[in-house]
Image (cartoon, helix red, strand yellow):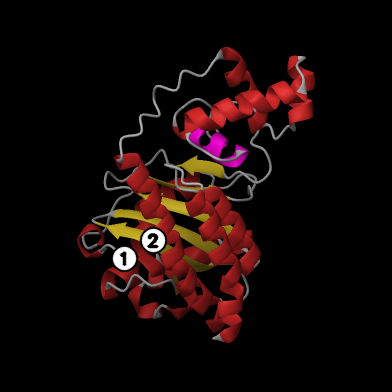
Amino acid sequence: MRASLARCAEWLDLTVTLCRSPCPVFPRAALADQLAVSFGCAVSWNWIDADGSYGFELREPIPGFPTDEEAIRWSTEGLSNHPILRWYAATRDTSPMSVGRVPRILAPAGFDLLRELLAPRGLDEQLSIPYHLDKGSTRCFVLAQTGHDFSDEQLEVARLVQPLIAVLDRQSATLTRAGDDLGELDLTGRELAVLQLLREGLTAAAIGHRLMISPRTVHTHLGSIYRKLGVADRMQAVLVSQELGLLPLPGSEGPPAPHGLPIRWESPVPYHRAPWSSARLVSA
């Protein structure tokens, strides 16, 4: 237990930092980065909505993943048979859970599909950290590796981290409901230009060189951008701008995402739900 608490100290620091710089957009990129540090494995942010749409954001891209065939198989048979989703539906226990701890009898087809589709990519052993499970709507981080299940200590850390992630989700949702109208930002043309270059990961000096202005002027524009978006740093500025449609989402058409921002994928094929899935998933 002491080792787990020590590993969570950095999570408490991150949570305090993010709470002191509140943002209406859930800081999933920053959380994914910290999860990668804490667990040393692949990390994705996953969602399923009540209308059957689903997708994920990979912290690090996997070339060619998923293929069209894989997307169809996940929609028609994969998600409805995923061992962890089956576990949540059967037990109503929304604590973090790993695939290796789910009784095989709950989802024999799901285990086979994970091995077939994800073992070659090194992602078949998974640990889910859900922070929202409600009436078919799911939000969670998924940690993935291959070769062996996640350890008891890692599962314990995930369970200690889960409420911290939930707190940040509630903060973002509360700020959104508070009525901050981020739609009327009134960004100037020069601020939009700075924002585009910010997305490329350029420094203030590099942005100034591109736009033929001084780094000091760039910092003035950045201060104005942060104020109008209601954010505190460049990562939050990029994420909020993507959510508002001011910048393209990672993985969509446009310049490549800078290092540290996730690669987003959304299935073009709706998720075909099993009869139990929307009725049994409950809020954490």
Pick the residue in front: 60 or 195.
Answer: 195
Residue tagged 1: 284
Give the spatial CA distance, label 2 vs label 1. Answer: 6 Å
Amino acid at dot 1: Ala
Mark 2 Cα shell of 10 Å, populated few (<14), some (14-19), many (≥20) = many
Q: Which residues are magenta?
A: 234-242
Q: Is residue 238 magenta?
A: yes
Q: Where residue 48 sits in the image (x, y, percent)? A: 36, 50
Amino acid at dot 2: Tyr
Pick the residue in front: 68 or 165.
Answer: 165
Asked if the residues shown at circle 2 and circle 1 are in contact, with their CB atoms under 8 angstroms apart, the answer is yes
**Label 2 SS:** strand
**Where, quadrant-wise, is the C terminus in this rendering?**
bottom left
Q: Where residue 110 sits in the image (x, y, percent)? A: 41, 67
| Whether residue 146 is visible | yes
Horizontally, residue 193 falls left or right of residue 246, namely right
Q: Residue at x 36, y 43 (%)?
A: 175
Q: Is residue 70 magenta?
A: no
Residue tagged 2: 131
Q: Residue at x 46, y 18 (%)?
A: 186
